[in-house]
């Protein structure tokens, strides 16, 4: 069992890391502490911090997509204002200017995940996502949409251009 101090320290570190990367954690302290307890429990149970809102297989390779921050965080933030478990939220949600919409589960079933993995392995070098470039600092990221804030120079998403 983890102490309140461990939970608070991990939550604080997570928030600092998120902010440094242009992300925001949920401002509801008690809600966030509950999620952090789940992350720490999964760290103890599996050896990695899988999302506390999803059922982990207990096999790191099978769970790579749900290790926090999960593969679905950014599209969830762009579409709904929060990630599936609501640990991460947009700047507007953090500031209380908006509330997030309900987030549907994006994670495909196991058979579909296996099929996607096999497809990626069969076509080496194939791009799954567009590449976005920050016009200010040159930061590159491959994802459906540019980040809300550049994690390097902190400019807003409108300063990104599609690179590839």
Image (tube, helix red, strand yellow):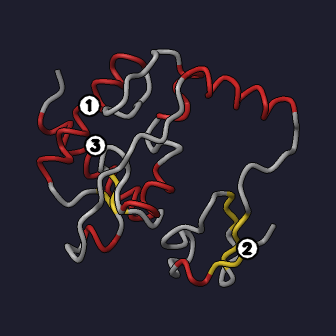
Does the residue at mark 2 contact the one at mark 3 (Cβ under 8 Å)?
A: no
Specify the quadrant that holds the C terminus: bottom right
Residue beneath the point at 70% across and 73% down: 133
- Residue at mark 3 to residue at mark 1: CA–CA distance: 11 Å
Where residue 81 sits: x, y (%)?
35, 63
Where residue 86 sits: x, y (%)?
29, 50
Hey, which quadrant is residue 114 in on the image?
top right
Say which label, 2 or 3, has the lower sequence index: 3
Say which label, 3 or 1, has the lower sequence index: 3
Residue beneath the point at 48% across and 71% down: 148
In-image side of 103 versus 59 (left or right)? left
Residue labelled with disc 2: 162
Q: Looking at the rendered structure, which numbered label has been put on residue 38?
A: 1
Residue beneath the point at 52% across and 16% down: 59
Above or below, 61 relative to 11: above
At mark 2, the secondary structure is strand
Dot 1 alpha-carbon crowd within 10 angstroms: few under 14, some 14 to 19, many 20 or more: some
Residue labelled with disc 3: 10
Pick the front one: 106 or 162? 106
Does the residue at mark 3 contact the one at mark 1 (Cβ under 8 Å)?
A: no
In-image side of 68 versus 15 (left or right)? right
Specify the quadrant that holds the N terminus: top left
Say which label, 2 or 1, has the lower sequence index: 1
Hey, which quadrant is residue 91 in on the image?
bottom left
Q: Looking at the rendered structure, which numbered label has been put on residue 98?
A: none
At mark 1, the secondary structure is helix
């Amino acid at each position: 069992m983890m102490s309140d101090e461990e939970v608070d320290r991990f939550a604080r570190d997570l928030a600092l890391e998120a902010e440094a990367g242009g992300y925001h954690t949920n401002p509801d302290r008690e809600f966030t502490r509950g999620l952090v307890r789940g992350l720490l429990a999964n760290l103890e149970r599996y050896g990695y911090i899988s999302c506390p809102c999803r059922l982990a297989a207990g096999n790191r390779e099978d769970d790579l997509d749900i290790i926090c921050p999960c593969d679905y965080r950014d599209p969830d933030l762009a579409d709904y204002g929060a990630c599936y478990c609501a640990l991460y939220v947009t700047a507007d949600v953090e500031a209380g200017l908006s509330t997030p919409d309900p987030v549907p589960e994006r994670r495909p079933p196991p058979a579909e995940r296996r099929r996607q993995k096999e497809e990626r392995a069969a076509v080496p070098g194939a791009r799954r996502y567009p590449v976005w470039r920050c016009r200010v600092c040159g930061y590159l990221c491959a994802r459906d949409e540019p980040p809300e804030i550049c994690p390097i120079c902190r400019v807003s998403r409108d300063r990104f251009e599609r690179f590839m």
